[in-house]
Image: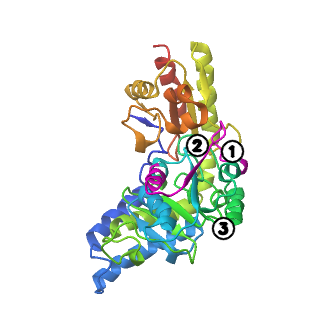
């Protein structure tokens, strides 16, 4: 049986969420845009999901746009101030430690002529006010896009301070909170104009996410072809996936941060055990990212000198332990983690492994993982 320690890539779906998807697919399968009663029953499922996301993000339910996932929501957010035909006098400010769906969307905007300003992170992956001010200077800014919690290191960004900076610039603040929602306190993303969510990161189904937006902020569609989601995201919505999202978001809002906070001792024991193992086996092991309070309680990212991250992950997989060497959205490429490279350089990135615990992780699994590393590191 596999010990699953890749919860930042995706989480095991809640049985209740799976039940909701199945039951809705069987009973509320009508088109939610239809005016007849079957259609309206399907639409009621969408509205429940919207309310659940609004409660979880602390943004108005009526301003929640349902999307195909976190990647689409991030693209929608970055597109908003820079849509073709929109007069925008200002730059996009972001960093290379963001999720690929932000980095690559920013690169695409740059090819279109949008000024993109890349902020250098600290070695711990933090985007500081000082670094952001240094790269912006006196330029006008239209949008700031920052993760609440780093998807590879768990680094918590100073969103409150960045909110004040965005206010001073008269800019919108988009926060990718995919790794924070249901895991961290609302203050982690509080004050954002736009917040991104992905259902499968909170034990809901894949294929659905949301962009929650401050009232009064105008979004522009990336796709064309329908009036769904107030014309912002055309295409027939799936009530079944929305039902699973609703269940997952409701549970995440009820004690989610407490459940993840309880994982910190297990994460710390695993991390300390790996550092000790490295010293015993003659392998230099280093933690990538912060080790104090400025990190999510369930994530550790470590570099193992002399190993390539993907090879170490493959060796552990043969031992029955599932971890990753970077973002799941960048898996299958030969390149090392761009996040760790931006923070600490290529050598650390090449040998980096991310371990992310979840609600289902037990103490016995931590012990078994340490034993698996002990067997692998002698090879």
Residue 74 lies left or right of residue 34; in this view the side is right
Residue 83 lies left or right of residue 122; in this view the side is left
Alpha carbon of mark 2 to alpha carbon of mark 1: how far?
12 Å
Q: Which residue is mark 2?
A: 298
Query: Which secondary structure lies at badge 2?
Result: loop
- In this view, the residue in front, 156 or 217, is 217
- In this view, the residue in front, 249 or 292, is 292
Q: Considering only vertical position in the picture, is 326 above or below 130?
A: above
Which quadrant does the C terminus fall into?
Answer: top left
| Dots 2, 3 in contact, CB < 8 A | no
Q: Give the mark, 3 or 1, whose residue is nearer the N terminus.
A: 3
Verify whether residue 124 appears in magenta: yes
Q: Residue at x 35, y 67 (%)?
A: 223
Specify the quadrant of the image occupied by residue 295.
Answer: top right
Badge nearest the viewer, 2 or 3: 3
- In this view, the residue in front, 113 or 21, is 113
Label 2 Cα neighbours within 10 Å, binned few <14 / some 14-19 / many ≥20: many
- Give the extent of the magenta segment: 104-130
Verify whether residue 283 appears in magenta: no
Q: Which residue is mark 1?
A: 294
Q: Which residue is mark 3?
A: 170
Q: How is the image coloured?
A: rainbow
Number of disc labels: 3
Query: Which secondary structure lies at badge 1?
Result: loop
Badge nearest the viewer, 3 or 1: 3
Task: Name, please, the residue furthest toward the bottom.
Answer: 36
Q: Considering only vertical position in the picture, is 201 above or below 213?
A: above
Q: Give the mark, 2 or 3, whose residue is nearer the N terminus.
A: 3
Q: Residue at x 69, y 47 (%)?
A: 131
């Amino acid at each position: 049986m596999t010990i699953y320690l890749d919860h930042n890539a995706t989480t095991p779906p809640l049985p209740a969420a799976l039940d909701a998807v199945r039951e809705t697919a069987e009973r509320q399968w009508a088109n939610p845009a239809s005016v007849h009663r079957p259609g309206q029953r399907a639409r009621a499922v969408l509205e429940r999901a919207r309310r659940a996301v609004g409660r979880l993000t602390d943004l108005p339910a009526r301003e929640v746009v349902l999307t195909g996932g976190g990647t689409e929501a991030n693209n929608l957010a970055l597109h908003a101030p820079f849509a073709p035909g929109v007069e925008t006098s200002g730059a996009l400010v972001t960093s290379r430690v963001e999720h690929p769906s932000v980095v690559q969307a920013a690169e695409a905007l740059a090819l279109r002529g949008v000024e993109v300003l890349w902020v250098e992170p600290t070695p711990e992956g933090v985007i500081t006010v000082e670094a952001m001010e240094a790269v912006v200077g006196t330029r006008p800014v239209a949008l700031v896009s920052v993760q609440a919690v780093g998807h590879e290191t768990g680094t918590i960004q100073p969103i409150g301070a960045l909110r004040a900076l965005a206010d001073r610039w008269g800019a919108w603040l988009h926060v990718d909170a995919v790794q924070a929602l249901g895991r961290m306190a609302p203050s982690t993303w509080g004050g954002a104009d736009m917040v991104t969510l992905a259902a499968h990161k909170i034990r809901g189904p894949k294929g659905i996410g949301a962009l929650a937006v401050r009232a009064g902020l105008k979004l522009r569609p990336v796709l064309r072809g329908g009036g769904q989601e107030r014309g912002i995201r055309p295409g027939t919505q799936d009530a079944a996936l929305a039902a699973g999202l609703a269940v997952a978001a409701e549970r995440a809002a009820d004690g989610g941060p407490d459940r993840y906070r309880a994982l910190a001792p297990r994460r710390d024991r695993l991390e300390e055990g790996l550092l000790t193992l490295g010293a015993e086996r003659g392998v230099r092991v280093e933690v990538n990212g912060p080790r104090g309070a400025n990190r999510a309680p369930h994530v550790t990212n470590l570099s193992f000198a002399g190993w390539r991250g993907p090879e170490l992950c493959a060796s552990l997989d043969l031992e029955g332990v599932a971890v990753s060497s970077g973002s799941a959205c960048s898996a299958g490429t030969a390149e090392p983690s761009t996040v760790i490279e931006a923070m600490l350089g290529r050598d650390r990135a090449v040998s980096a492994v991310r371990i992310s615990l979840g609600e289902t992780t037990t103490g016995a699994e931590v012990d078994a993982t340490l034993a698996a590393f002990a067997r692998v590191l002698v090879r």
